[in-house]
Image (cartoon, rainbow, N blue to C red):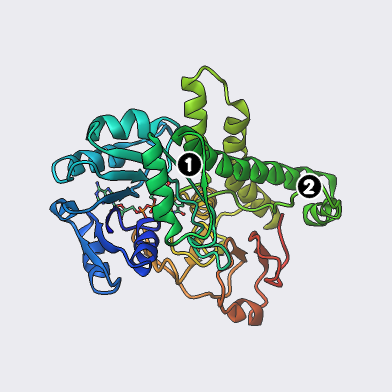
Amino acid sequence: MRVAIIGQGYVGKPVGIAAHGAGHQVVGIENDLSRVKELASVLGYEVTSEYSKVSGASIIIIAVPTPLDEKREPDLTFLVSACKSLKGSVDSNVLIINESTSFPGTLRNVIAPILGSNHMYAAAPERIDPANKIWDIENTPRLVSGLSEEATKKTAAFYRTFCREVITVASPEVAETAKLFENTFRQVNIALVNELAQIAYALGISAIETIHAASSKPYGFMPFMPSIGVGGHCIPVDPSYLSFAAREAGVDASFILLANKVNSLMPGYIAARIEKLLGGKLTGKKIQIAGISYKADVSDTRESPALALIANLREMGADVTWHDEKVGAYNGEKSSNLEPVDLGVIAIAHSGVDYSKWRISQTMVIDLSTNPNTGWPKLL
Ligand SMILES: NC(=O)c1ccc[n+]([C@@H]2O[C@H](COP(=O)([O-])OP(=O)(O)OC[C@H]3O[C@@H](n4cnc5c(N)ncnc54)[C@H](O)[C@@H]3O)[C@@H](O)[C@H]2O)c1
């Protein structure tokens, strides 16, 4: 089948690789020209910015960003613009599948009305976890549902060509909401454990030991680890799509809003703990942060709480540099080599980082990462 994939980012690219690997004729449509250039010769399938190349495709997959706007409400600008661009080039009776994360009703009430009744539509939200070495596109079950039975069947048959398990649900709204709920589940549990970290500190006990102790219960408990907060395109964003849908439906999603708040206050809480650790004043103190992306072994800095921690520490007068060779450069600043400082902070523990400069210089180091094995003392 000829398959066009709109957006060649963290989601569109692996889907393109998987569909190409399954023998489909893939074309990636990407409107960032530098990305087109970067990907054109390495993927084995065509990547172009020309929407006219969707002509001849019997399946079109949409995988474009769905961020939050400045009021932290759903921003469907990219999705709407992709649909409008598609409208002029798509053949008739094509299967249009949305993989982008959005609130329930997006397929039915936003995408289908722009592209018209002459097509089949399905939701198949992507659940990929970048850098996860165990779970990938092939072995993570795929939820699918179409606006018609035929759309559901065709979508399920397509994903079966490269996913081991395809689960059909009753409506696209169930698939859309399930995706949001998965990430909201993580958001809420991370907030809860971050709250526990604050309680444990005030009580003078170890949060981590407490969590391990609770984990010995063989049923009804799932451990989450405290951290600097949540980042990336999903966990800090998707719950706000669910709370938006809840509000539109007349439900006050207070639990989700509270979890957002607890996590977003973590960098400030940690900055205050660091200030205390360094004697109550940060003015002139040299602090180096290791790892500024939102999680280990990725270069993505979107919504990264490490950046909020840096901003907090600088506001409090500290002289902050950062080391992250995966990110390399951010906001006009470059990754600096690890060096002797007043405090080294492991925000995110990328694999393969050489901390020997801190070790040799006996720099005081605290570890905020969820990696249990860095060998440095945990702050939370
Ligand atoms: N990153 C993740 O881990 C992840 C996981 C599951 C779901 N999602 C969801 O998948 C969707 C895509 O996320 P992503 O992380 O791949 O984003 P991304 O920014 O990495 O990639 C999206 C790509 O789409 C391109 N694009 C934007 N508008 C376009 C248009 N009109 N036409 C063609 N190309 C366009 C951008 O240039 C970009 O390269 C979002 O809804 C996101 O929430 C992301």
Above or below, 110 relative to 207: above
Q: Is residue 99 visible?
A: no
Image quarter for residue 261?
A: top right
> Disc 2, disc 1: CB below 8 Å?
no
- Seen in the image, is 332 located left or right of residue 360? left
**Residue at label 2?**
221
Q: Residue at x 35, y 56 (%)?
A: 12
- Residue 9 vs residue 339, the one in the foreground: 9
Mark 2 or mark 1, which has the lower sequence index? 2
Q: Position of residue 228 (x, y in %)?
A: 61, 52
Q: Residue at x 83, y 52 (%)?
A: 210
The residue tagged with tag 2: helix, strand or loop?
loop
Picture quarter with the N terminus: bottom left
Q: CA distance from mark 2 to mark 1?
A: 25 Å
- Residue 265 vs residue 239, the one in the foreground: 239
- Residue 367 vs residue 326, the one in the foreground: 326
Which dot marks residue 63? Answer: none
Q: Position of residue 309 (x, y in %)?
A: 54, 52
